[in-house]
Amino acid sequence: MTTKIHIAVDTLGRPLKLVLTPGQRGDAPLAATLLEGLSPRRVLADKAYDSNALRALIAGMGAEAVIPCNPTRTRPIAYDFEAYKKRNTVERCFNKLKHFRRIATRFDRRALYFLSFLHLAAALLWMR
């Protein structure tokens, strides 16, 4: 069994919200859960989060969606490429989390234990 870590980070790359799902689950349906309770000016995400429903949700929040189009779209939607370059803060946060050996090698068999340690590691990243 595999799992996916979905994460929302702030401008400085500190984790705000973590969600753990089965590995075969899609990314875009989880975006609403990640954005719940947040008030961003921009939402930067990769192509896996490209959906009309998510774009409508982001617009409803009064934020700008900076999401490249999935290649299967017939009509591409423009996005701010310069702003998208800052999405690497998410990747850097994942990198920092994977410095914890327990996360990188996934020692925990149960998802609850793994998610608990993810939250602990996220708290430690905030204290740095």
Image: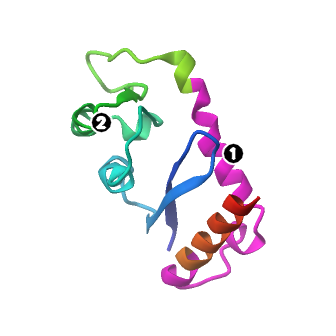
Determine whether the residue tagged by mark 1 lies in a helix, strand or loop.
helix
> Horizontally, is 127 left or right of 9 in the view?
right
Does residue 109 show up magenta in the picture? yes
Does residue 70 show up?
no
The colour style of the image is rainbow
Q: Position of residue 63 (x, y in %)?
A: 34, 31
Q: In the visual, does 30 lie left or right of 100?
A: left
Residue 75 position, x and y percent, is 26, 15
- Range of the magenta residues? 85-114
Q: Which residue corresponds to the image point at 28% horizontal and 39% vertical from the top-left?
A: 54
Where is mark 2, residue-wise? Answer: 58
Q: Is residue 108 inside the magenta stretch?
A: yes
Residue 1 in the figure: left or right of residue 59: right
x%, y% of residue 91? 64, 44
Q: Amino acid at mark 2?
A: Ile
* Disc 1 to disc 2, C-alpha distance: 23 Å
Above/below status of 31 relative to 102: above
Could one spot residue 58 in this view of the protein?
Answer: yes
The overriding secondary structure of the stretch rendered in magenta is helix
Please tell me how crowded label 1 is: few (under 14), some (14-19), or many (20+) other residues with Cα within 10 Å.
some
The residue singled out by tag 1 in the image is: 92
Q: Amino acid at mark 1?
A: Arg
Residue at image location 26% in from the left, 18% down from the top: 74
Name the spot of residue 51 as percent of width and height, x first.
Answer: 28, 36
- The residue positioned 33% from the left and 57% from the top of the image is 33
